[in-house]
Image: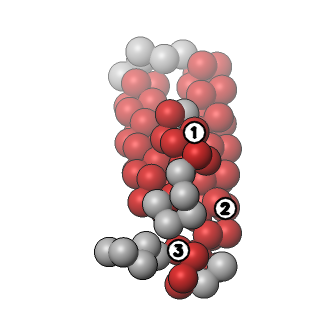
Amino acid sequence: MSLAIEAALKSKYTKLNILETLRIKTGVIQNLVRVENEVGILDLNSYVRISGQLVEISKMTNGWINFITEKGPSFAKDPFV
């Protein structure tokens, strides 16, 4: 959540790196939740609820990344790098 808020408040040139980090961390959390379910730490109802929320976060993050990159190279890349 903190990465999404940070991306929302940063300039257009730094959003992409933060969103990529958010996408990676969301994937890691999805895998951890899956393993917790497989070893019996999470019951099925909790797993379904949490994994559904993570899928929505992932979709929103990917949509945001696609929006930024479709605006063109000048919008997605930092000109000072």
Q: Picture quarter containing residue 33?
A: top left
Mark 2 belongs to which amino acid? Gly
Q: Tell me: 59 left or right of 21.
A: right
Is 12 rendered above or below residue 39?
A: below
Give how far apart the Cα atoms at labels 1 and 2 are.
Answer: 16 Å
Question: Which labelled disc corresponds to residue 30?
Answer: none
Toward the bottom, the furthest residue is: 73
Is 65 rendered above or below residue 54?
A: below
Regarding mark 2 in the picture, which secondary structure is present there? helix
Q: Which residue is mark 3?
A: 76
Question: Which labelled disc corresponds to residue 63?
Answer: 2
Give how far apart the Cα atoms at labels 3 and 1 are.
Answer: 18 Å
Q: Which residue is mark 1?
A: 5
Rendered residue at 53%/51% (across/down): 10
Mark 3 belongs to which amino acid? Ala
Label whose residue precedes the other's in the sequence (1 or 2):
1
Is 18 rendered above or below residue 80?
A: above
Q: Is the residue marked by circle 1 packed among few (<14), some (14-19), or many (20+) residues within 10 Å?
A: few
Rendered residue at 64%/60% (across/down): 64
Toward the front, the furthest residue is: 80
Question: Circles 3 and 2: CB distance less than 8 Å?
Answer: no
Question: Circles 3 and 1: CB distance less than 8 Å?
Answer: no
Toward the left, the furthest residue is: 81
Q: Examine the rendering and report whether any part of residue 20 can be seen.
A: no
